[in-house]
Amino acid sequence: MIPFSPPKIDQSIIDEVIDTLNSGWITTGPKTKKFERELEKFCGNSRTLCVSSGTHGLELILRWFGVGEGDEVILPAYTYSATANCVIHTGATPVMVDTNEEDFNLSVEDIARKITEKTKVIMPVDIGGMPCAYNEINELVKSSDVRKKFQSRNEIQEKLGRILVLSDSAHSLGAVYHGKNAGQLADISVFSFHAVKNLTTAEGGAIALNLPSAFNADEVYNFLNVFSLHGQTKDALAKMQNKGWKYDIIMPGYKANMTDIQASLGLVEINRYRKDTLEKRRDIFNYYFDRLKDFEWAENPVYETDKICSSYHVYMLRIKGTTEDTRDKFISKMYEKGVSVNVHFIPLPLLSYYKKEGYQMEDYPNAYQKFQNELSLPVYYDLSVSDRKTVVDKLVETAKKLGF
């Protein structure tokens, strides 16, 4: 069976984890802090805080910015539930927008229509690793008309003076947009290092700060660090110093820190990520594209343009002219042929909780159109050339059997 996306675990990662276990330091410590510095160098943003998950990272930022009951957060209908769930946790209301016609990312035109006096945050999601239209989004929130609508409710919101752009960059570490790396494209970006991501720490994530100069990045980092540790003024590393045992609790914070065991995986991967991991994934994307480009039923995803380069996270193929039911048959038959494929994602309005909350799929026609014929193909570091060939061969066989 060809799996969909197993993690890359080789001897160098095993050795680094063993080194951490032997060090006696397994919670947040020197390797987590080193991983943060390596991420800062890789992305080029001011400061980065590693956390226990991308979802926790998003919620920490929403709460830092003071988002709560009565506020609205704009996000795509076409995303994983984590994007909207963290908004629900704060008591705010997710305001969903439709996708573009040409790709899977959210429509800037629909964002503009949905902005109100209650809007505090826009959360673009880089679906599949392809960056959203950040130039247009950043211009929109800085425009005089949109600034006039913004109503600050605390000192942080007053200092920014506009809607916060918080990127759900769970898929896009290593993506490049108009010469800038993911992590530099929004006010704040949050990465995920879940087991299926290009770079994994098993679970985990990172908050990449890229705020305007009015903010002191070190101060924001220090606050978030305390916020992620129950509001405790010293982390375990600081408490281990001479006379360092005394601490204070200055807020009812969260438990959202990354451990050194997790950071061990990340340290190995970040150092070979650009020249090794991304190149391997790009080769897989190019292979699929070249093999499928001449089939009328296959619509390949956009993953590179002259100014934008994805992180090659998910190969989101679309089967032209098919229905949701037929797409599901593709999945079953591919599995029967020994190939695991997937769907990214079930749009939020189709999920029971969000249906119950009144969101209707008919309001997001582009999102549904893409969902009903989307099929994600296996992409992972150790996917061999022969396995890639098998994936495409079985896909072509399945398409013929289903009448395409």
Image (cartoon, rainbow, N blue to C red):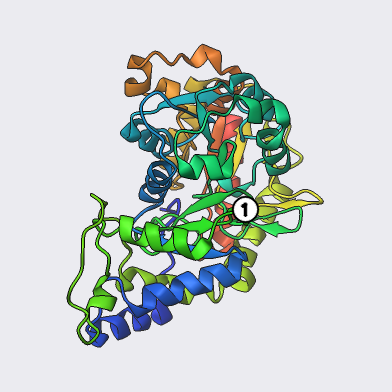
* Residue 141: percent from left, percent from top: 65, 35
Q: Is residue 220 left or right of residue 25?
A: right
* Quarter of the view holding residue 375: top right
Q: Position of residue 6 (x, y in %)?
A: 41, 58
Residue 9, how many percent across, how many down? 40, 71
Q: Is residue 265 above or below residue 74?
A: below
Q: Residue furthest right?
A: 306
Between 369 and 300, which is closer to the camera in this rendering? 369
Please, what secondary structure does the residue beneath circle 1 have? loop
Residue at 78% in and 48% down: 305
Along the line of sight, the residue nearer the viewer: 158 or 277: 158
Q: Which residue is mark 1?
A: 212
Residue sitting at x 48%, y 36%: 343
Does residue 13 appear anywhere in the picture?
yes
Q: Residues within 10 Å of mark 1 (few under 14, many from 20)?
A: few
Q: Position of residue 204 (x, y in %)?
A: 37, 58
Q: Name the quadrant containing residue 84.
A: top left
Classify the position of the C terminus by image quarter.
Answer: top right
Q: Is 313 displayed left or right of 176 in the figure?
A: left
289 sits to left or right of 359: right
Total count of labels = 1
Closest to the observer, 272 or 209:
209
Residue placed at 56% from the left, 18% from the top?
364
Specify whether residue 26 is in view: no
- Amino acid residing under circle 1: Pro
